[in-house]
């Protein structure tokens, strides 16, 4: 599968023009819902960024965070960078969700919903 992803990465790098790409994050007035506003080149370049991060996860496992570098074609309508990094997860969804739920109810977690007023 790695060769297929590498082929897609090469194709996107060769065929997508960052000079015409547009990709933007925005949110509703309450900041509760997010949206992407993009042209096809912007979507392809964002996909390229994510595919490159997936390859980086294979080459360098056990990273805590992988920064998404600011790009000329990436614009934030909110005035701040909504997504600045990828936090790698190295397990299947079921395991990640189970661990997340266990951590939510850990004794020292101030975000534990049982203790909210």
Image (cartoon, grey):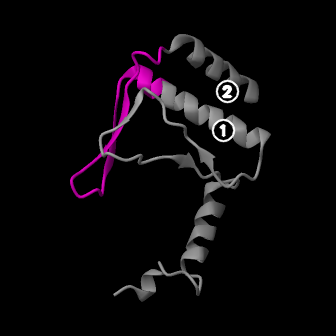
What SS does tag 1 mark? Answer: helix
Segment tinted magenta in the rendering: 17-44
Which residue does the image show at 30% across and 40% down from the upper left?
A: 77
Q: Position of residue 76 (x, y in %)?
A: 35, 39
Among the 4 quarters of the image, the one containing residue 104:
bottom right
Dot 1 crowding, Cα within 10 Å, few <14, some 14–19, many 20+: some
Mark 2 and mark 1 residues within 8 Å of each other at the beta carbon: yes
Along the line of sight, the residue nearer the viewer: 92 or 68: 68
Image quadrant containing the C terminus:
bottom left
Q: Position of residue 16 (x, y in %)?
A: 50, 15
2 vs 1, front mark: 1
Which residue in the protein does label 1 denote?
Answer: 54
Q: Please give the label number shown on residue 26.
A: none
Which residue in the protein does label 2 denote?
Answer: 5
User: Does the magenta segment cover residue 5?
Assistant: no
Among the 4 quarters of the image, the one containing residue 51:
top right
What SS does tag 2 mark? Answer: helix
98, above or below 73, in the image: below
Which residue does the image show at 44% across and 27% down from the upper left?
A: 72
In-image side of 85 versus 72 (left or right): right
Q: Position of residue 55 (x, y in %)?
A: 70, 35
Which residue does the image show at 75% across and 40% down from the upper left?
A: 58
Q: Is residue 1 visible?
A: no
- Which residue is farthest top? 15
Dot 2 crowding, Cα within 10 Å, few <14, some 14–19, many 20+: some
Q: Earlier in the sequence, mark 2 or mark 1?
A: 2
Q: Position of residue 114 (x, y in %)?
A: 44, 86
54, above or below 114, in the image: above
How many numbered badges does the structure rendering display?
Answer: 2
In-image side of 109 versus 10 (left or right): left
């Amino acid at each position: 599968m790695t060769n297929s992803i590498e082929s897609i990465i090469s194709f996107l790098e060769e065929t997508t023009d960052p000079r015409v790409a547009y990709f933007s994050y925005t949110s509703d007035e309450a900041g509760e819902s997010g949206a992407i506003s993009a042209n096809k080149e912007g979507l392809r370049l964002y996909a390229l960024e994510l595919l490159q991060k997936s390859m980086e996860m294979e080459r360098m496992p056990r990273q805590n965070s992988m920064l998404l570098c600011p790009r000329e074609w990436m614009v934030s309508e909110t005035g701040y960078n909504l997504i600045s990094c990828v936090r790698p997860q190295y397990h299947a969804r079921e395991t990640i969700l189970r661990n997340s739920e266990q951590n939510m109810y850990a004794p020292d977690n101030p975000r534990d919903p049982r203790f909210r007023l």
